[in-house]
């Protein structure tokens, strides 16, 4: 008997008791559906989070700040030259920057000053508060346009869609190339400075750094200079944070650099580490749902065992006849094993197709409700590799479940089987 004959025999024998087989396939379908839709959500969320941390941006970039443990329960700290009241607010001085630059394991150290803007104005002339940051050199997820300059003196800005609309552009694409005014008021001289910035891109809305516009390096420098007008030199040389890049990209190299900075009294964290906990949270949540799917598959595997045991009992005389005609135990085992695999294959494929259909409905519902306005976020996504893996694992589970009844069928004595009533 060839493999083709074994497969045909298994396929036809599977439907001797349609009701029992259908119920078993439905049980497998439920497990497959649960796991498929859960992995689809996991893929969708992780894909979106990867976009928001810059896709191919420098996620190893470190953000460095002074260590200050006022909330650790140890009470007020004693004064030292390293920890004074002056730097308790998180600001750093030139000495801090020089000390950080001398730390082994990091490069491209850049000190960032406070770049506060009083308000911003577009063609509508209405004054708006603007929430923005200096570019960190990563590639931001853009709806349209290009990235701002990370060096030089160009005054460029990335806006959010809301800001573009507020400035009087219902079709946000039309603001590209236009200029807006940023007004800075010096806290010392009260001098009002108007800085013109060219809009070069529009950011996609996101859950990471939501609502923040981005200044180019040159624009940030002009804003800082206007803020510091009239300040004593000692107060000008204060920095909100310092960014640097580890020399090596491996986790060990990053950890070594962080340890070296910690010994000097600084906390450091990479962008990758900052979002690591977010990834872990979503993965843990989807992991729990996968466990429920696995429980459903375990229950389905017992259904497979029951279905095939009943099939062996119902077809005992048929098995005896096949063995009496010369069919070996291995062939009999193969027939029942193929039946188990077919149950897994049909159930998993139907579950996968159902999950894709349900995923489409969930995506439409999410886009019109809790994900409304968040571009680039497809809640449920499927890929071929994970889909084929699900089908393969389920077929393996049903095959293993079917080995017990298949083994029993293979061991039947043909004479005893023929006499079975």
Image (cartoon, helix red, strand yellow):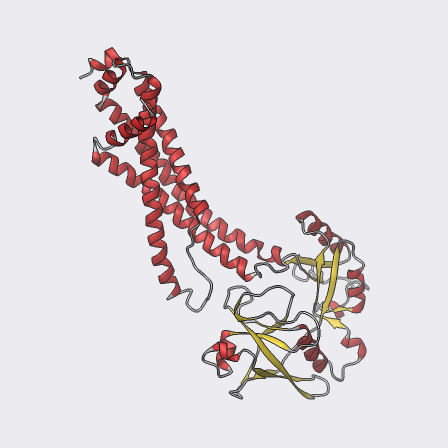
Q: Is residue 224 above or below residue 266?
A: below
Q: Is residue 6 above or below residue 357?
A: above
Residues 258 and 83: in front is 258
Q: Total number of numbered labels?
A: 0
The answer, for residue 58, to whether it is visible in the render is yes
Residue 419, by quadrant, is: top left
Residue drawn at x 28%, y 14% as measured from the top left: 326
Residue that sits furthest to the left in the current view: 421
In the rendering, at what x and y percent does residue 174 appear? 50, 79
Quadrant of the image containing the C terminus: top left
Apparent side of residue 46 relative to residue 340 in the rendered image (left or right): right
Residue drawn at x 69%, y 47% as measured from the top left: 252
Residue drawn at x 56%, y 66% as measured from the top left: 209
Residue 54, by quadrant, is: bottom right
In the rendering, at what x and y percent does residue 310 appear? 25, 26
Apparent side of residue 313 relative to residue 99 in the rendered image (left or right): left
Residue drawn at x 28%, y 13% as measured from the top left: 413
Residue 121, by quadrant, is: bottom right
The answer, for residue 369, to whether it is visible in the render is no
Residue that sits furthest to the top in the current view: 415
In the rendering, at what x and y percent does residue 359 appear? 37, 54
Apparent side of residue 54 relative to residue 319 in the rendered image (left or right): right
Quadrant of the image containing the N terminus: top left
In the rendering, at what x and y percent does residue 262 appear? 74, 55
């Amino acid at each position: 008997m060839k493999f083709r004959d074994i497969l045909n025999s298994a396929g036809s024998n599977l439907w001797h008791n349609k009701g029992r087989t259908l119920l078993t396939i439905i049980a497998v379908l439920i497990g497959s559906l649960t796991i498929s839709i859960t992995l689809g959500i996991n893929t969708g969320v992780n894909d979106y989070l990867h976009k928001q941390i810059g896709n191919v941006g420098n996620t190893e970039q470190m953000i460095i700040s002074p260590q200050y443990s006022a909330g650790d329960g140890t009470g007020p700290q004693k004064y030292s030259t390293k920890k004074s009241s002056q730097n308790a607010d998180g600001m750093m001085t030139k000495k801090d920057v020089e000390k950080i630059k001398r730390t082994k394991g990091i490069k491209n150290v850049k000190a960032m000053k406070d770049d506060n803007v009083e308000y911003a104005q577009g063609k509508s002339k209405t004054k708006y508060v603007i929430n923005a940051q200096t570019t960190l050199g990563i590639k931001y997820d853009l709806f349209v346009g290009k990235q701002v300059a990370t060096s030089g003196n160009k005054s460029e800005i990335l806006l959010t869609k809301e800001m573009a609309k507020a400035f009087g552009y219902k079709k946000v694409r039309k603001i590209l190339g236009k200029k807006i005014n940023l007004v800075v008021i010096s806290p010392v001289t009260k001098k009002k400075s108007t800085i013109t910035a060219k809009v070069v891109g529009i950011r996609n809305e996101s859950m990471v750094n939501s609502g923040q516009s981005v200044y180019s390096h040159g624009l940030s420098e002009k804003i800082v200079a206007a803020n510091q007008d009239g300040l004593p030199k000692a107060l000008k040389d204060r920095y909100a944070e310092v960014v640097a890049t580890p020399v090596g990209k491996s986790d060990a190299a990053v950890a070594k650099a962080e340890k070296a900075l910690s010994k000097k009294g600084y906390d450091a964290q990479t962008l990758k580490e900052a979002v690591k906990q977010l990834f872990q949270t979503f993965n843990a949540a989807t992991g729990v749902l996968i466990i429920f799917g696995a429980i459903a598959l375990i229950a389905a595997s017992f259904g497979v065992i029951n279905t095939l045991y009943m099939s062996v009992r119902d077809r005992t005389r048929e098995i005896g006849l096949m063995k009496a005609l010369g069919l070996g135990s291995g062939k009999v085992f193969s027939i029942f094993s193929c039946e188990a695999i077919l149950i897994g294959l049909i159930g998993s494929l139907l579950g996968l197709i159902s999950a894709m259909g349900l995923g489409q409905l969930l995506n439409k519902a999410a886009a019109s409700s809790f994900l409304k306005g968040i571009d680039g976020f497809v809640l449920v996504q499927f890929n071929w590799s994970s889909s084929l893996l699900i089908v393969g694992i389920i077929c393996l589970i049903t095959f293993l479940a079917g080995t017990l009844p298949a083994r029993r069928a293979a061991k039947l004595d043909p004479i005893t089987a023929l006499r079975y009533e």
